Amino acid sequence: MNTWLGLDPILAVGAVILLAILAYAVLGGADFGGGIWDLLATGPRREQHRLAIAKAMGPVWEANHVWIIFILVILFTVFPPAFKSLSIAFFGLFHFVLVGIVLRGAAFVFRANAETTSPSWRLWTQIFGAASLITPFLLGMAVGAVSGGGIRVSPAGVVTINAAQTWFSPVTIGIGLLTVALSAYLAAVYLTVETRGEMQEDFRKRSLWAGSVMFALAAILLPLIPTGSPHLWEHMASPLSAPPMVLGVLLAIVSALSVYRRNYGLARFAAVAQVLVILGGWAFGHWPYIIYPDVTAYNSATAIPAIRFLLNTLPFGLALLIPALWLLFKVFKGEHPQAETK
Amino acid sequence: MSNLDAARFQMAYSLFFHMMFAALGVGMPLLMVIAEGLYLRTRKDTYRRLAKTWAKATGLLFAIGAVSGTALSFELGLLWPSFMEFAGSAIGPAFTLEGYAFFLEAIFLGLYLYGWDRLSPRGHWLTGVGIAFSGAMSSVLVTATNAWMQNPVGVETLVNDPANVDPWNMLFFGNSTWPLMAIHSTIATLAAVGFAVAGVYAWQMLKGKRDEIRKHGLTIAMAVGTIAAITMPLTGDLSAKVLAKNQPAKFAAMEALFETRKGAPLLVGGVPNVETGEISYGIEIPYALSFLAHGDFTSEVMGLDQVPRDQWANVPLVHYSFQIMVGAGVVMMLVGLYYAWLRWKRPDQILQSRRLHWILLLSSPLGYLALQTGWIVSEVGRQPWIVWEVMTTASAVTPSPGLMTSVIGFTTLYTLLAVVLVFLLRRLRHVQ
């Protein structure tokens, strides 16, 4: 078998996709979460909340968003048949995701020049918020659906979908909701680091709310997995996956406690780590499947040259991206970045 | 409407929409960088205000370009799943490289738009250079995917011996369609943006707003527009030669050349009748087509008679689009030359000449017209193939039901966004 630097090249690509998914989750996810808090903003300081969210997202949201393009490009470059099957299975869902992505980006920039008291501000706020809520829900559903076993792909490539097992499965819907809660939690925790005073207290409260919802959803979801997604459960029940699961729970507790005790730096760190562990755990459980049970990374991988191309160019791409991203986040996301601007 | 027609319509409309903003993503950063560079050099405040104003517009427009581009990467699979299954690994490498370039562009844009007070003046300007450069690179690299669809180098290897495919060769260094297409279409975006921006200032000057900031704005836009417009015919001519070699059937459709001929004439205008193979109302320039295609007045140019009837593109549409593109290009070149002459001989007239302002106003959409008709020539001219002479568009389309809904949905969404954008851009004022 062909190897790449002595590694299984398909596994290496899997790792690259996982990294891109993780980056999208902790960066893009927080942008969605920002939109959710924008929608849910209440109280005397609600327009200040919205301005703080817009300020936090403004410089970074477009870059954060590129991760999903990377995920798609790697999928269709290395696993073309899997991309085809996903595109057919998610024809409707992805179209709604697209509408969500287009509308929230457009509404966000359209709103930027409006006065907070104008009707156009209200309109764009509602569109931005609603799209920010629905899009991660749909993306979460997609993650649930590829693990659920309701999407079947025949050897000839014909895609059939068992709707009850896919769209209406409690696990699929639960993962969608959990994605929304995680996004909201991440955003609220990030905003506690980026704001001061009363605003910081507001976002602390919101973090605790989102964290509670997250715990509740996870508690409801867990007993549903053995029947709703037996393939994931098989992995979760194995002794090997116990340490990361315990770690995930611990990190969630540490993060929530740190928010409670107003140690926001640690809370942000633990919240990010928690998302990485949860998603990583899902990915390890799901691997090597792309669409369970018919499409795996191995039976849909293309020939070696395109894989090599991707892996060989990656270090050069990252050598450009990482310093640029570092600069972006250093300039706009240091400690209390919003405290120092006028 | 069949699934094929619906999918083609949605793809065409999405690309048409995206192209408007993608071009701005390449062109506007260059204008901003020039203005800010002049500010750093001369310390004239009008240049800083120009750069800031253009940055404001770009912030609005780039976001729409970015999200509609994301939509396109999904739509490739949603509309053409079998094409992506067949060609994903062939064109994916170009998308990967474009991904890095676009990522950098998005990062630098964030730094530029929000970093006026956080970066040193020079550092800020450099992030602008980063946007302009990575924007142009995105355009150059992503064109390789389309170039491969036009000229699928190495497709036999891809099908028969996939382990020995060479992506660099297929997409870039071994594909003669790519370099010219990449340069031609990237310069076209600069011409489009230069003329469009100049038109805005000419319009304001016609309304009596003749101040220094508008004069500088017009000058920078026309500098970019003029240089781009003058170089377009050169890359266009070279592209035609490559096209005549790699895609003679498309070349025949562009020229509405029904019969294979030696010493073929160049058709200017004309209404082709695909049933009878006759042209009405056209002007023929003897031998010129043979020369354009092969650099030899007596050479043979392949006509549509050598292409099976069911493999013809939509000849009238391709021919008219080509004529419009070339016509717009020629007019822009002449306008650019007139502008350059006026600026050289009578620089005071830039602010005063109503004739110049009318000419610039009327020619301001020509760059976009040429850009879009050029892509129609490229894409409609490729039909019925999605991958030239390898895979038909009809065999690539999705089997999914509900395509009509998505077509109506996307058309409505993009049209509404465009209306809102026009409204918001009209309210944009120069930053103080």
Image (cartoon, grey):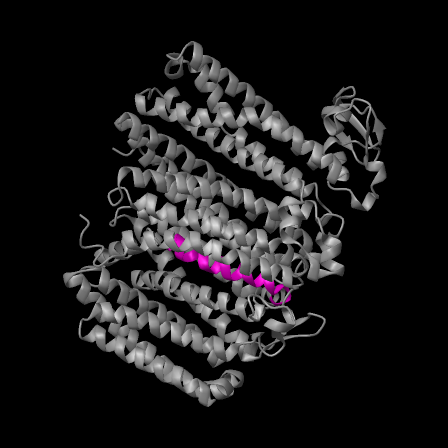
Up the image or down, B177 lies above or below A283; here it is above
Residues B202 and B241: in front is B241
Write the residue at 40% across / 53% down: A62
Quadrant location of the C terminus of chain B in the rendered image: top left
Write the residue at 37% across / 72% down: A275
Decide if residue B427 is on the left or right side of residue B94: left
Where does the image place residue B139, in percent across and percent down from the top left?
53, 43
Decide if residue B279 is on the left or right side of residue A289: right
Residue A216 makes an appearance in the image: no
Where does the image place residue B219, in percent across and percent down from the top left?
40, 23
Write the residue at 49% across / 86% down: A233
- List the single residue furthest toward the top: B345
Report the label total. 0
Decide if residue B255 is on the left or right side of residue A205: right
Residue A154 makes an appearance in the image: yes
Where does the image place residue B417, in percent across and percent down from the top left?
45, 47
Quadrant in the picture for residue B428: top left
- List the single residue furthest toward the front: A6
Write the residue at 41% across / 10% down: B346
Residues A261 and B355: in front is A261
Magenta highlight on residue A303:
no
Up the image or down, B328 lies above or below A16; here it is above
Which residues are the magenta region? A61-82
Magenta highlight on residue A69:
yes
The secondary structure that dominates the magenta segment is helix
Where does the image place residue B236, in percent across and percent down from the top left?
63, 30
